[in-house]
Amino acid sequence: MVTSSAARRPETPRQYDAYDPSCPSRGLFDRLSDKWVGLVVSALGDGPLRYTDLARAVAGVSQKMLTQTLRTLERDGLVSRRVTPSVPVRVDYELTPLGWTLMPLLYAVKEWAEVHMAEVESARAAYDADR
């Protein structure tokens, strides 16, 4: 009898379900879909950055939004903040091991958007022309 690999896998109860409105993973899913989160994590995929370098890499983000995004990512364990005592104080941000697990997903979405943007713009124009 031939069985699929899914059937051979032991049943493990699913602790989290983002479709359930009371599930905490829904909040994380919401956070990860924020444009600043995606851009900040992607920028840190090139290695640690100082705050000013990160602000430069993510053009258009306000100081308030960048600070808020970094604090949220740090709280979620995706980014670490390292302070080096100097004059002026040096603060570096980098992805944690958990943050690195997110990189392939965000990079794929970023690449997809860049590759398919012309098609999306064309579809938008066609949709708007029909309205």
Image (tube, rainbow, N blue to C red):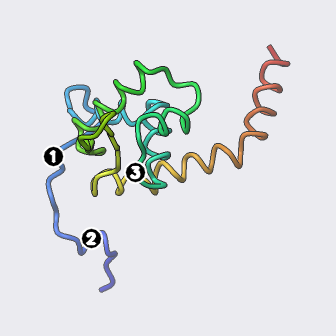
Residue marked by disc 2: 7
Going from the N terminus, do you reach mark 2 or mark 3 first?
A: 2
Q: Amino acid at mark 3?
A: Pro
In the rendered view, would you say 70 is above or below 110?
above
Report, in whole angstroms, how far the alpha carbon at label 3 lies from the one at label 1.
Answer: 33 Å
Q: Amino acid at mark 1?
A: Gln
Residue marked by disc 3: 48
Report, in whole angstroms, how far the alpha carbon at label 2 lies from the one at label 1.
Answer: 19 Å
Mark number displayed over residue 15 = 1
Name the residue located 83 percent from the left edge and 26 percent from the top edge: 126
Q: Quadrant of the N terminus?
A: bottom left
In the rendered view, would you say 111 is above or below 89?
below
Q: Residues within 10 Å of mark 3 (few under 14, many from 20)?
A: some
Asked if residue 6 lies left or right of residue 112, the reply is: left
**105 or 62: nearer the viewer:** 62
Farthest-out residue, top: 131
In the rendered view, would you say 36 is above or below 116?
above
Q: Residues within 10 Å of mark 1 (few under 14, many from 20)?
A: few
Name the residue located 40 percent from the left edge and 18 percent from the top edge: 64
